[in-house]
Image (tube, rainbow, N blue to C red):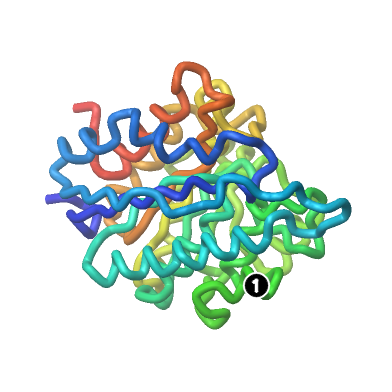
Amino acid sequence: MNAVKNNNISIIGVPLQYGADRKGVDLGPDAIRGANLHERLRTLGFNIEDTGDLDVQRRLETPKEGEKLKHLQEIVRVNTELCDKVSAEMARGQFPLVLGGDHSIAIGTIKGVLQHVKRLGVIWFDAHTDVNTHETTFSGNIHGMSLAAALGYGHPDLVGIGGAENKLRPENVVIIGARSIDPGERAFLKEKGIRVFTMHDIDRNGMKQVMEEAMEIVSNGTDGVHLSLDLDGMDPFEAPGVGTPVTGGMSYRESHFAMEMLFERNILVSAEFVEVNPMLDQHNKTAMAAVELIGSVFGERIL
């Protein structure tokens, strides 16, 4: 039996790069597919439906000087479409597996899941915490605001995707692997009481204890858990093809062990893998790492 709740997976590609400030992350969905994603999942016994990619405008104007949120309109449009798509696939009884694109797409994915799972837990694997808002951002890049928006904080157009009333609760969210946190984000995380397992926690206590605590938090009183995995959570040596690499990240085995533990707990209802940038990658190493992690989260084992 598969310990992920659903045997039917819908793959949704979102080639969006406007939430980041590096070109190339729009090529991520195809790079992940090209690293034998379908074959891997079929070998594990899953039924795969690839719904293709959402339509994203390929060329946008350069943001104006002093513009607070870069490419807001297109990001809202794509995330609204993604929210509807994820919701429609779940209504058909499918497990949505979303391939990014930059991490701004988490808004649409999570909001889509929230149409069906009212009390949702989220595990956010990332070097960053992505809880900036239009008031705290230094860069104006919306991929650094996606978790805040899903929690109901930030620009009304982002928060309103899929209905402003559909939002995460801070006590149901954990962040794992953080090692680059802005001052405004630090204050936000403390104020909201969001549990963050930094690399220091992983070093000190090991991935087993971190994951046990994390899964306890996200499954306490929730109706299902969403995995949002940014490949920059891994060390850049393991995953060089990301837009915002930060040294000192999770090792290959730590990352896989975390995915294996998630599979064993049987709590996931949806997942997304984001920020694979083939233009910055070495021999497709990061896309292959993404597919290997997806394999682990869906039950692949060494023996």
Residue 217 at least partly seen: no
Is 118 situated above or below 16? below
Residue 137 or residue 69, whichever sits in front = 69
Q: Quadrant of residue 297?
A: top left
Quarter of the image with the C terminus is top left
Q: Quadrant of residue 89?
A: bottom left
**Residue 110: x %, y % from top left:** 47, 64
Residue occupying image coordinates x 60% and y 59% = 75
Left or right: residue 282 compared with residue 149: left
Residue occupying image coordinates x 55% and y 72% = 161
Q: Residue furthest bottom?
A: 165
**Residue 183: x %, y % from top left:** 81, 53
**Residue 278: x %, y % from top left:** 51, 28
Residue occupying image coordinates x 28% and y 54% = 10
Query: Local crowd at mark 1 within 10 Å, few (<14), some, or many (≥20)?
Result: some
Q: Quadrant of residue 17?
A: top right
Residue 99 at least partly seen: yes
Left or right: residue 255 compared with residue 104: left
Say which amino acid is labelled 1: Asp
**Residue 255: x %, y % from top left:** 44, 35
Residue 20 or residue 46, whichever sits in front = 20
Q: How many marks?
A: 1
Where is mark 1, residue-wise?
A: 157
**Secondary structure under the numbered disc 1 in the rendered image:** helix
